Amino acid sequence: MSLAQQFGSDNYAGICPEAWAAMQEANQGHAPAYGDDAWTTAAADAFRALFETDCEVFFTFNGTAANSLALASLCQSFHSVICSEIAHIETDECGAPEFFSNGSKLILVPARNGKLDAAGVRAAATRRDDLHFPKPRVVSITQATENGTLYRLAEIAAIGDVCRSLGLHLHMDGARFANACANLNCTPAEMTWRAGVDVLCFGGTKNGMAIGEAVVFFRKELARDFEFRCKQAGQLASKMRFLAAPWVGVLQDDAWLRHARHANACARRLAQALEGVSGIRQLFPVEANGVFIDFPPDALAALRARGWRFYTFIGEGGARFMCAWDTEPERVDALAADIRAVMAERSATPALVAGA
Ligand SMILES: *Cc1c(COP(=O)(O)O)cnc(C)c1O
């Protein structure tokens, strides 16, 4: 039933040993339901230790819910959320942020390498202040970005400063927060609340869990009644311990960072193996676990014919190759070899090169 490893998404990977072991350990006897159990408390405490602050933590099934409910808790229906034009909340959540906030509008800002900058945020937030336009209330940034790039700490802090000066909240979509921490070599606290982030959606699924994201509120007042929002949205797990236990497993002994470092290293390995291949272009700096490549259309088809799966609709296009906690370096090398072979065949067929 299983496929040879593919690079379509980091969520093609299975469950990492630490998450699996914790699930198994949690699967003993009975425990209170709906989060009233020791695993849920332990997981929330692990987050408080990790972030070195007394944050409020909630567990949802997926990232769309985490983002949408977090944003809804920061906004009234007449508010707006400033984000990049390629933000997951805009392009890949089927309107859930607008739906769960009862209509808060997303204000899209062009992004360079997937990132907003402080000046762009300020311009978008101050363009209108009349009552005919939804009132800016939140800025949402994605770390690591949809293009596999990273905000540096100073860039986050600069956006955080703009938010503070304009009375905006700062939300971070951290579906790949682990990959960002692993490559920037900074603490989770530095990357978030110390830089002005109010709410983080911390991704577990793409980092080796079966299911689950954590919504971390660094300002407790913003978390008020959030559990009701989760319940109403169908995001309150009755057997919560199985959503919480894997977090205890991966947060222990830095397993989450180890897995992210491995995924990032595999992406760098792929990028390096493709340096100098003519006819293709790497679209973005490889700063996390994804590599984006611009191929001629016939080369995409040839690569697919060789059995490779990848997406071409993410971010600004190009073929996206994602590495995960379990990526085998040999598979990376096999992919790189096939890309080289496809491009070599192509350059040996002049009509193709001319016609493409
Ligand atoms: C994967 C991902 C999410 C979460 O997606 P779900 O499929 O809803 O879990 C959120 N943001 C980004 C940037 C992602 O890549």
Image (cartoon, rainbow, N blue to C red):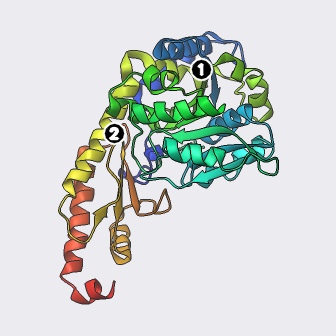
Give the SS element for disc 2.
helix
Inspect the image, locate mark 2, and give the three-letter code of the amino acid beneath it: Ala
Inspect the image, locate mark 1, and give the three-letter code of the amino acid beneath it: Phe
Give residue 43's quadrant in the image.
Answer: top right
**Is 219 on the left-hand or right-hand side of 257?**
right
**Is 329 on the left-hand or right-hand side of 120?**
left
| Residue ID at (34%, 74%) | 296
| Residue ID at (78%, 22%) | 225
x, y percent for residue 8 = 43, 54
Q: Does 136 appear above or below 169?
A: below
Q: Considering depth in this image, is 192 or 265 the residue closer to the camera?
A: 192
Which residue lies under the disc numbered 2?
Answer: 263
**Is 220 on the left-hand or right-hand side of 232?**
left
Q: Considering depth in this image, is 314 or 36 the residue closer to the camera?
A: 314
Which mark, by number, is residue 90? Answer: none
Q: How many marks?
A: 2
x, y percent for residue 92 = 60, 52
Q: Does 81 appear above or below 247?
A: below
Which residue lies under the disc numbered 1?
Answer: 218
